[in-house]
Amino acid sequence: MFTSMSLVQEIGLAVLVVAALVWVVGLGHMLWDSRFHHPEPGAFEGLAFIPAQRGTASHPMESVELTEEEERAFAGLVRSIPLH
């Protein structure tokens, strides 16, 4: 192919060109699908891997009882946060 390149360099270049073409085709396919795929209304209710938020009655292991000193320290911390 090229007289100034070794066989290994030519093979490496060919692999890079093929990888770039596969990437461009994959990107084009992804963009095509996202542009022309219109799901039914209500079909997408959010991301499946993020669990739904529980109400105020959560699992007992998800809450911690604070001492009065900890509550005062937390309240002071909250007051120190600047609001923009």
Image (spheres, helix red, strand yellow):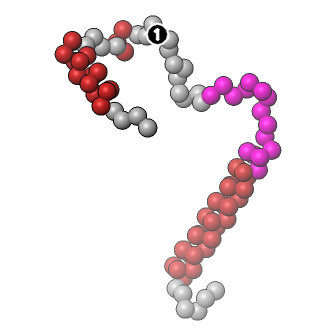
The image quarter in which residue 18 lies: bottom right
Dividing the image into 4 quarters, which one contains the N terminus? bottom right
Dominant secondary structure of the residues highlighted in magenta in the image: loop
Q: Is residue 2 above or below residue 45?
A: below
Taking the image as shown, residue 58 lies to the left or right of residue 14, namely left
| Residue closest to the eye, 71 or 50 | 71
Task: Give the SS element for disc 1.
Answer: loop
Taking the image as shown, residue 62 lies to the left or right of residue 44, namely left
The image quarter in which residue 60 lies: top left
| Residue closest to the eye, 84 or 32 | 84
Q: Is residue 32 above or below residue 44?
A: below
Dividing the image into 4 quarters, which one contains the C terminus? top left
Q: Is residue 72 above or below residue 19?
A: above
Q: Residue at x 54, y 20 (%)?
A: 52
Q: Residue at x 54, y 74 (%)?
A: 12
Residue 40 on the magenta span: yes
Residue on which disc 1 sits: 56
| Residue closest to the eye, 55 or 3 | 55
Amino acid carrying label 1: it is Thr
Crowding at mark 1 (Cα within 10 Å: few <14, some 14-19, many 20+): few
The image quarter in which residue 79 lies: top left
Residue at the limit of the structure toward the bottom, as seen here: 3
Residue at the limit of the structure toward the left, as seen here: 69
The image shows residue 40 at horizontal and vertical percentages of 79, 29
Q: How many marks?
A: 1
Q: Residue at x 34, y 33 (%)?
A: 81
Q: Residue at x 78, y 40 (%)?
A: 37
Residue 64 on the magenta span: no
The image shows residue 75 at horizontal and vertical percentages of 29, 21
The image shows residue 34 at horizontal and vertical percentages of 73, 45
The image shows residue 74 at horizontal and vertical percentages of 27, 22
Q: Which residues are magenta?
A: 32-46
